[in-house]
Image (cartoon, grey):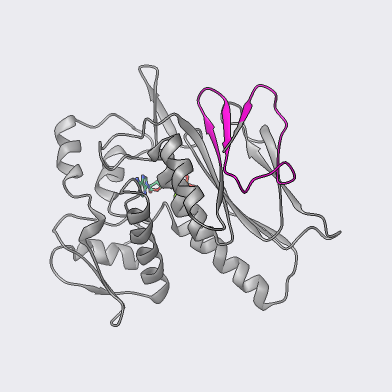
Amino acid sequence: MSAFKEESDISKINSKAGTTSQAVNKDTYFVVKNAVEYSQILEGTFDPTIRPLVKLWNIGNDKETIPKKAKIEEALKLVNYNDVILDESNCTIMLKNKYQALDVGGIAKGFAADEVRDIFHKHKVKSALIDLGGNIFALGSKDDGTPWRVGIQNPFESRGDFIGILNVKDKSIVTSGNYERYFMKDGQRFHHIIDPKTGYPSQSKIISATIISDNSIDGDGLSTGVYILGIHKALKIIEAIKGIDAIFITEDKRVYTTSGIDKNIFVLTNDEFSSVSN
Ligand code: ADP
Ligand code: MG
């Protein structure tokens, strides 16, 4: 599913954009299909055709610069999840127009976490903490039967400093933030989640979005998109999805939780932050 490796399904789809469809592995099909579904749910803030913009910004690599406006405008025209043509019966995917390109970097790690969970289930592993960096799967409970305790990173401090603790059993916890992959220019932060409507890194007041769900693919897809949506819409959309909860941290150090998160599940431990329950 890599957008970089030449032989990957995603690269093959990208190189055939606007020409022919590409037969893919069923896992690739499943991930792209889910990505398109999340694009719909998240009103296009999540978009797997974001690749031309991601490539332009090149965030997370050296030599980062702000791209020229004309280049951004050009890349923006290529981003549209409605142009992903899925054919389930043949397991093929095609992009409608030339130069369009897929990037499932915002959702594939969630899929991978679910796969690890399934392998553990198959081998009757009852208790495990799966950590894919930003994607945690707490399988079962701790050995002594108590819930897993997972810290939520303080977005203002270095790695390991948490603002509170989640107590969970059999849940995926995925966080998207602006504090791990970014560069600074003229006092402004340019991070790796790009708003498909503007072509620039998202400017919402959310600086960390955590999704708690049964499947990690859902958490990953949702955490990337809600981040762009802004706090009010994000809360509304997550509340409307059964079985999924969220914790959002805004730049004014408020911590918003959805209604499924009670005091037994999430404990705010850092008093610099104030909690706002939905
Ligand atoms: P991470 O990979 O750091 O855990 P995310 O799950 O939030 O973070 O995904 C970020 C990645 O998603 C980016 O590196 C990029 O490949 C891709 N991406 C960036 N903006 C968007 C977007 N608006 N919609 C879908 N994918 C995006
Ligand atoms: Mg994601």
- Count of labels shown? 0
Q: Position of residue 246 (x, y in %)?
A: 55, 45
Q: Is residue 217 visible?
A: yes
Q: Nearer the viewer, residue 17 or 61?
A: 17
189 shown above or below 112: above
Q: Is residue 256 magenta?
A: yes
Q: Residue at x 13, y 58 (%)?
A: 98
Give the farthest residue toward the bottom. Answer: 89
Q: Position of residue 132 (x, y in %)?
A: 58, 54
Q: Quadrant of residue 275?
A: top right
Q: Residue at x 49, y 60 (%)?
A: 217
Q: Is residue 93 magenta?
A: no
Q: Position of residue 91 (x, y in %)?
A: 31, 78
The quadrant the C terminus occupies is top right
Q: In the rendered view, does 171 fall on the left or right side of 46? A: right
Q: Quadrant of residue 67?
A: top left
Q: Nearer the viewer, residue 101 or 277?
A: 277
* Magenta residues, start to end: 247-275
Q: Position of residue 265 (x, y in %)?
A: 71, 46
Q: Quadrant of residue 3?
A: bottom left
113 shown above or below 267: below
23 shown above or below 115: below
Q: Nearer the viewer, residue 96 or 6?
A: 96
Q: Is residue 60 visible?
A: no
